[in-house]
Image (spheres, coloured by chain):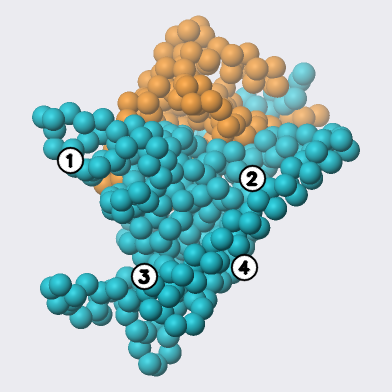
Chain colours: A orange, B cyan
Amino acid sequence: MFAGTRESALLVYITAMIALMLSVLPLPQLLSIAWPNLLVLAVLYWSTMTPSAGGMLLGFVAGLTLDLLNGSQLGQHAFALSLVTYLAIRLHLLTRAKPIFEQALFVLIALFVYEATLWAIDGFSSHHTGSWTRWVHIASGAAIWPVIVGLLGRLHSPR
Amino acid sequence: MAFAGGGLNRPSSRDSAPGPRFFFFAVLSIVLMYFDQRDGWSERIRYVLTVVAYPIQVVIGSPGMLWSATSDLFETRASLRAENAALIKRDRALALTALRYEALEQENARLRNIHGALPPLVRRSQLAEVVNADLGRLRQRLVIDKGDRNGLYRSQAVVDATGLMGQLVRVGPLSAEVMLITDPGHAVPVEIVRNGLRTIAVGTGEATELDLPYVPVTADVKVGDVLVTSGMGGVFPAGVPVGVITESRRDPDEILARVRAQPRAEMDRSHHVLALWFDPGHPAAPVDPKLVESLPPATVGQPVTTPPKPPSEPPPEVEPKSGEKP
């Protein structure tokens, strides 16, 4: 009865919203550096497991939301997240059949592409490019990928 | 739980063509970035989008707000009474200080040969609640629940009960974004109260630290010195408490000393902030940058001690237009 793209799209956007809430929790300094970008991870998960539910639109909308909430250049996160979503959707047949630790490696690469795109746009537009701490979430994001798969995998029947 | 059956895997039109979609979104993002950089009509797009984003900001800020609301709910009568007693005591102490302050102000006016009482510096203030905080190494921002509707304007000074917080960088209809003085992109012109040394305090990205990178080794700066705004730059008025020097290290080989300060305002703990409007006639009010440009060059040995007379036609608007850079 829940079949169809509409319900799953709803589920996708709800989880994205929860991920967004969790990613901006006020945290102590050290923890906040290592805190993974959960919204990007959620987008990566849905793009890999069910590309039809969220699709490219999810990546763009999530990126634009990040732009607005971060007050960064309008379109910066939207571009980076669209790019990563595109890669995840294009490669989803390849990645989703892989063991979870190999998937985490793909996530590591995707997060690196994401952060490097943001970093490059910051540089092009002569904004503050930040210190090395901006790269920490790549490692932590890849590290908690199995947890993300475990949690979000319960919400639907994967594959 | 089987939430979405087999519908998730059914190929649909959505995943059939991610390429063209990506191309479309990428071009859209680049167009947005281009116009945002050029400060064109994207300011208006952003203005509209802030209305859409405001509920999201409230929702994602809600766990913290919910916590403080619940702890309010369970406050006991005894603790409220104790708090009330403490506040009355503090009020008495502040009233005494205010008394002394008024006498000093009059004495100051006499010394400066200004006749008649000065108008109060702060003409109006608007209390606003913090609905969301973004306190990372890269950004130190707050979102408050008042905006254009309440007359807030870009580059307006924001304080809390203890000191300077920052300035408004973005104003939407219902909300506004405060760039804190601890933001790595923010610099505030300051002055050391003890000796009047003027310098600049730059944010570090940590809510409890400011950097003073332009202090020469020979300058007289000690740990414990109090920093106030110097009134330069035309955004903040003179004399607002900023912080206290916590570190002052000198290396004789270097030209500049390493000076750090702790901000006075509680960046990561304040729930309420005040946006201020200043009386342009007051000497301590922030100087309008346009007014400074029209100043005649001061002759040597005769420093300008009084603010320039406003032109006789309608007084210049001190509040900068929304399109201006702060």
Which residue is painted at 21% across and 31% down in the image?
B250
Residue A61 drawn at (x, y percent) = 53, 43
Q: Which of label 4 and label 3 is nearer to you?
A: 3
Is any part of residue A113 visible from this angle?
yes
In the picture of the structure, the residue carrying the numbered disc 4 is: B149
> Is A113 left, or right, of A31 in this rendering?
left
- Circle 3: residue type: Val
* Numbered disc 1: secondary structure: loop
In the picture of the structure, the residue carrying the numbered disc 2 is: B271
The part of the image, by quadrant, that contains residue B32 is bottom left
Q: For the N terminus of chain A, which image quadrant?
A: top right
Q: Is residue B305 above or below residue B144?
A: below
What distance separates the C-alpha of mark 3 from that of mark 2?
29 Å
Which residue is painted at 75% across and 25% down in the image?
B3
Task: Check the residue under mark 2 and report the chain it is in.
Answer: B
For residue B218, the mark is 1
- Mark with earlier residue (4, 2): 4
For residue B287, the mark is 3
